[in-house]
Image (spheres, rainbow, N blue to C red):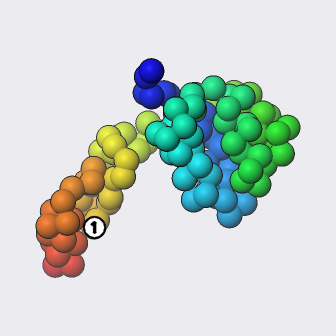
Amino acid sequence: MSLDYRTVHAHMLLRHARNRGTRHDLSMALMDANFHAGRNISDKDVLAEIATRHGFTIEEAQAILADPAELAETERQIAASRARGVRSVPTFDIGGIVMGGGSENEIAAAIEKARR
């Protein structure tokens, strides 16, 4: 079973969850669904069902997921992040140093460099 799903639609919901104060919980639920339950988080029905436990009605989630303008905005934000060097999650921007994770020592060195 492949767990490698396109996540652009999940990110559409995550953008809206920020204003609802449920972004972190939704993010954790999506990771649990993907990595632990083996659910297809590129499936809009799966996403809408998960979103209903995190501040969305099924109709709100479905409307966001079906909106071409929402998809375009999310794709624009993804492209902007890639242009800044984001290639993985987590990614840190520490004083202009963009890091895709790293060891504690690498992160500490970037913080120290940013302080100078």
Left or right: 74, with 88 as reference point: right
Q: Residue furthest top?
A: 1
Please name the residue shown 54% across and 37% down the image. Answer: 37
Residue 37 drawn above or below residue 93 = above
Left or right: 53, with 6 as reference point: right
Residue 2 in the image, given as x and y percentages of width and height: 43, 22
The number of callouts visible is 1
| Depth order, front residue of 7/37 | 37
Residue 12 in the image, given as x and y percentages of width and height: 62, 40
Answer few, some or many: residues within 10 Å of disc 1's Cα (few below 14, many 20 plus, some between 14 and 19). few
Residue 32 makes an appearance in the image: yes
Identify the residue position indicated by label 1 in the image: 95
**Element on which disc 1 rests:** loop
Residue 73 in the image, given as x and y percentages of width and height: 60, 38
Question: Looking at the picture, which amino acid does disc 1 mark?
Answer: Gly
| Quadrant in the rendering for residue 58 | top right
| Depth order, front residue of 98/17 | 17
Quadrant in the picture for the C terminus: bottom left
Q: Residue furthest bottom?
A: 116
